[in-house]
Amino acid sequence: RRQLHGHKTGQTPEPLLGSLDIFIFSLIAGLLIYWFLFRKKTEPVLDFKTFPAVSPPIPETSFIEKMKKTNRNVVVFYGSQTGTAEEFANRLVKDAHRYGMKGMAADPEEYDMSELSRLKEIPNSMAVFCMATYGEGDPTDNAQEFYDWMQGTDDDLEGVNFAVFGLGNKTYEHFNATGKYTDKRLAELGGKRVFDLGLGDDDSNLEEDFISWKEQFWPAVCEFFGVEATGEDSSIRQFELVVHNDINMNQVYTGEMGRLKSFQTQKPPFDSKNPFLAPVSVNRKLNKGGNRHLMHIELDIMDSKIRYDAGDHVAVYPINDAVVVNRIGERLGVDLDTAISLRNLDEESNKKHPFPCPTTYRTALSHYLDINNKPRKNVLYDLAQYASDPQEQENMRKMASASPEGKALYQSWVLDSERNILAILEDLPSLNPPIDHLCELLPRLQARYYSIASSSKVHPNSIHICAVVIEYTTETGRVYKGVATNWLKNKEVTENGHKHTVPMYVRRSQFRLPFKPSNPVIMIGPGTGIAPFMGFIQERAWQKEQGKDVGETILYFGCRHKNEDFLYQQELEEFERAGVLTQLNVAFSRDQEHKIYVQHLLKKNKEQLWKLIHSNNAHIYVCGDARNMARDVHTAFYEIAEEVGGLTHTQAVDYFKKLMTKGRYSQDVWS
């Protein structure tokens, strides 16, 4: 105030405190006195009684300290994307018990992996790695930091005993790259390999490969450490059942993946632990005929702050068929609405529950557990004890064994006949497992990934999906229904304003349009493999509208019949008329006597394609089935390079390998 009233020279100075000053000073003093005297009544002081000064426990990031504290000598790390590697790791920990060893399964993301060199401080210790390969030879998300550490470290791992089992799929270019790298790198750093690298192939039978590997792995471990099997059964329980009789239902999980009530109060950012409930705004059938149901679905992401790029994947969390859930409950004579928790018997474990708890059996079987797939052998082995008929029990144990007879029986009775857990319970009438043990054994229900069929430049507030509903009759006469596609199909848009929602999040991908729009693009995507290319074409159209110089945009699409399942026919022909699609090549495989596929059309245009690839810097994109189509397309390109480019077969293979490395040959394929 003194500065505001700065006086000019020659003026009479003001009294030091004017009447306004006195009034304001009194007001402030009065407010201060009131606050000191009366604030306690309206706002309790935060004393220690109200809030104990206890910070949340800091999770132990030292697996060495944890192993020492809990007296363990085996640690099994898992790099897992869909839960299989984690499941295998848990099975190895159970096995260790049989050899008088004490193990723990560990997520490398939760621990400081640079401590690996300290493992030798624990006598007779060993680290086992179950490492899945994902995408184009990449480590799984939870193993990325460990992978980066291995690449950058020069730690001395002498005295560290290790073994690696890799999980991969031979239909992909970089088969088991992560497992192979882990095994090679740990040895280079001085680690001692206890047993040879195991390579599991999901294209044939991943579990069979794992069992064959561990049948040889444990004898090698016994020899290495000079121990022998204790003869103890490894079908020990990992979790105990707690029934909540008088729980407040607001504390019970109803399908959320992470935070309780996250579906009622949605808060960004949205990811795998916190999916966004996206309303379904469009759900239409794409095919005009035939006995399949192909669908186009649009998810509204208006208020989610979710961003995506053409080529990314949308992950959705489906819900199991209520009919199947109810039938499991009836078959086991259980009230599915009982509130329960499954609590880890190992109190030191970071994994307190197998799925979010407390919850009900109904929620667990609907949202959290995979009840539709064929159960793995360990499930049969652990459930066999609950079959009262000796013959049924023997058959279950036999199927879980590694004997040739057992393998054949499991192959025909479970795999070829496609029996899920309900079918097994129905066909083995004497089998009556406690439902809590069944819930402990079943794997988690996984998110399903779909290539996004839209461009965010054109559709910033919606994400499009293109999928085919899976439904067919199995050998036993039962109808097999794909979980996610049938669940999505039923999310119809109604007139009454009620919108069905889908829990979802976006997963980034490397499947990207060229940085320079002037680069030509060659897209090959038969069937639902068209999905990402709808996004690419929309984006090229948008780039054209922005006045950018857009290169040639060529699509190779394939379907069965022109008048039945030519997906997005109207839109594609419109893009062609507008000059956005420079060339639309469609193979109708069954519209003539001999089948015509996309690879045949590629060969037909070999000169033009070679010129675009070899001289014009074209980018190639392949989307769809990995097992046959992607391989056949590969072969067609090799032949084009040989026939038009004059390369030898070895040179052609090398040529396209280099294109892949440069990011000019990208694949978004599934098997």
Image (tube, rainbow, N blue to C red):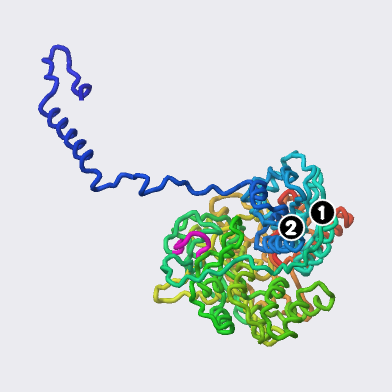
- Closer-to-camera residue (42/495): 42
- The local secondary structure at tag 2 comes to loop
Q: On the image, numbered disc 1 is attached to which residue?
A: 225
**In the rendered structure, which amino acid carries the disc numbered 1?**
Phe
Q: Amino acid at mark 2?
A: Met
Check if residue 259 falls in the magenta segment: yes
- Specify start and end residues of the magenta stretch as a single range: 256-263
| Left or right side of 257 for 661 | right
Mark 2 Cα shell of 10 Å, populated few (<14), some (14-19), many (≥20): many
Q: Picture coordinates of residue 138 (x, y %)?
A: 71, 53
Crowding at mark 1 (Cα within 10 Å: few <14, some 14-19, many 20+): few
Prevailing SS of the magenta stretch: loop
Q: Nearer the viewer, residue 471 or 42?
A: 42
- Farthest residue toward the top? 10
Q: Position of residue 211 (x, y in %)?
A: 78, 67
Q: Position of residue 80 (x, y in %)?
A: 67, 58
What residue is drawn where x is 76% and y is 48%?
123
Quarter of the figure that contains the N terminus? top left
How many callouts does the rendering have? 2
Q: Is residue 441 magenta?
A: no
Spatial CA distance of label 1 from label 2 is 10 Å
Residue depicted at 84% across the width and 62% down the height: 216
> Is label 1 in contact with label 2 (beta carbons under 8 Å)?
yes
**In the rendered view of the protein, which quadrant contains the C terminus?**
bottom right
**Disc 2: which residue:** 101
